[in-house]
Amino acid sequence: MFRFISYAIGLVFIFVLALAAVTGLIDSAGAETSEADLVREEFHASNKDVHWSWEGPMGLGVFGGFDDRQLQRGFQVYKEVCSSCHSLKRVAFRSLQDIGFNEAEVKQIAADWINEVPDINPDTGETTTRKATPADTIPLVYPNEIAARAANNNALPPDMSLLTKARPHGSDYLYSLITGYEPVPANFPEDQVSEGLHYNPHFHSLWIAMPPQLSDGLITYADGTPATVDQMGQDVTAFLTWAAEPKMEARKAAGIGTIVFLIIFTAFAYVAYRRVWADVKH
Amino acid sequence: MSFGWSKPYEPKSDFGKWMDARLPLPRLVYGSVGGGYEVPKNINYFYNFGVLSGLALLIQIVTGIVLAMHYAANTEVAFSSVEHIMRNVNYGWLMRYMHANGASFFFIVVYLHMWRGLYYGSYKAPREMVWMLGVVIFLLMMATAFMGYVLPWGQMSFWGATVITNLFSAIPIVGDTLVTFLLGGFAVDNATLNRFFSLHFLLPFVIAGVVILKIWSLHIPGSNNPTGVEVKGPADTIPFHPYFTAKDLFGVGVYLIAFSIFLFFMPNFLGHPDNYIEANALATPEHIVPEWYFWPFYAILRAFTFDFILPAKLWGVIAMGAAIVLLFFLPWLDSSPVKSMRYRPKARMWTWVLAADIIVLSWCGGAVAEQPYIIISQIASMYYFAHFLIILPLVSRTETPLPLPASISEAVLKGKESTGAPAGQPDSGPAPVAPEAQPAE
């Protein structure tokens, strides 16, 4: 009896699945991919390949940390270019010491920051703002999303604190995006052009609200490195990769130590296992 | 407490005798994982995954308790509190990455453990209860993992929770009321996050309780082995300690190395980038996928796309539930008296097809819901149900199994002669197949 119930249940599921399969195939035979999807498929560009310092030898990512000088240059790009629209709200000024700024420099950077920190006037209780200190996180650019959209033609510049972890292959993607603006190709269909947006083949919809930001010589690097688009793109991406994963170097160092220990431990455990079992036929 | 199976414990020291008469804890340890527990001597490395599952549970509980000290279950701050753990808490990144990757590794070892049970017939009499308690643990694990994934309050957390809880609305009449009851509101929100946190903290301890019951019920008949032949006498077994404590320690080392590679060098590989975007009820991700360990079941859920009498969604929910619940009936679906697939050539072949089928289902479950993935997942789902509900019951009644060895020790000695394996080689039994495939990865 039991097995006939099981056959019956199995056959019911298979029957319903077969119906779904047949109707699904009929539906998909009639379905056509929309023009927008076809255009996206045709013009979308894959990520440019960059060898980052943290990818280490052979790109394995086991060794290889951040290059502090690059991070400092990247911070300069963020500060002078990106920070007029994009916040970096999860990064505290104090953590800039981890990329090689000294205490006095960090204090200066915080105090000079273009936006101030919201505060309460201790005498009147009214809301006010004050200069940032190293203990503060980098102040917001806009007080809220509505203000951000109002200032940016209804587009929202995302916070950059986790950007490289929030996109697949985030560092390569971000670098490709900010250095990947192109003129609209001649064969691009007229009706797929989005007015008011900017053509970028690395963006998923090909049309992005952010205008191209980088141009050769846009900023003057403190360390004298020539500020090409490619250089600035790599530097700011490296900085944002650090901002998203500031403990990466500590993590990798701990990892190498842990794995060396575990290999030795496992080797001893294996020898012990074989010795304990030496007299057993199994 | 003592097990009929175990050798009697005889305390040697005066303190041991004193203790044994008052709280026989040493007796319990001796009889369950000590020198008193006799284990078939031919069990292979696949039998390491039980201990490894226990280790994975322990790692989750320890790291989870530390994380709970810093996490805040409130929609306003949950995402930020996770970032606080990552950036400001000493070794917070280590705790969080251990916990996140630990969940995946828990599922990897549990899936391999289940595969072992499936292949060597460990679910059969007299071990049905061991298997069924395992299925209970599996269900609890899935609930725990699902709710845990919601806690960081990223985009996938929020939308995964929305999609999965919405499945209950497919239940006729009470569906919508049930969803509201489960969520504590009309949408996934603060009440949902809070209760998920509460339950996510509770369930691992329930799992630990069921693990104790499972080990208890395992120790009544004792462990199965790759031949599936029951233990005939003392020549077939060796004590758990020191033989299997030594072997398990080695297994633990290998497991921790694999775990460390992910944890330290690719901690976000098994996660989804969208979960680093804070939850936003107004922006739906392009395609919503659960964690990889749910992919086979997610594929079955989505395979039902046709309203046959019942709505397709309800069919999907029923089938996904059935895909797991049928495991409870496995000991009776498979009526063959022979346990191990080593001696069941036909059933063995179908079992390997099942392994491939589950891998295909996983692949479809993680892919976008469009052709050809839909049709592939429909065919793979058909096989999944056909395997357990039709093929296995039929094969177990019609196949002619190979002759079984008279005893474990005979199988061991015969294997030595025919294969000429060097002494001390683990798993030198007569089976020509080495089970290597993983049911879902």
Image: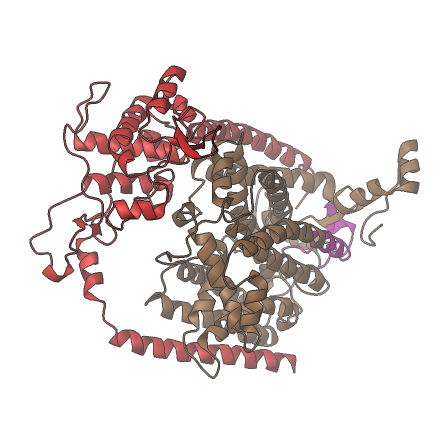
Chain colours: A red, B brown
In the rendering, at what x and y percent does residue B260 appear?
50, 37
Is any atom of residue B142 visible in this view? Answer: yes
Residue shown at the point (20%, 49%) measured from the top left: A45
Q: Is A7 left or right of B270, judged from the image as shown? A: right
Instruction: Indicate yes or no whether the magenta region holds residue A7.
Output: no
Camera-side residue of B275 and B36: B275
In the rendered structure, does residue B235 fall within the stretch colored magenta? Answer: yes
Left or right placement of residue B308 versus residue B147 in this view: left
The residue nearer to you, when weighing B192 against B232, is: B192
Q: Residue at x 34, y 39 (%)?
A: A160
Q: Is residue A48 visible?
A: no
Tell me which corner region of the image, top left, top right, bottom left or bottom right, holds residue A61.
top left
Residue B127 image point, x, y percent: 71, 61
Residue A10: % across, % down:
53, 77
Residue at (58, 57) in percent of width and height: B143
Q: Where residue B174 sits: x, y (%)?
A: 57, 75
Q: In the orientation shown, which residue stands out farthest toward the left?
A: A186
Which span of residues is magenta-colored?
A: B211-238
Q: Is residue B210 above or below residue B333?
A: above
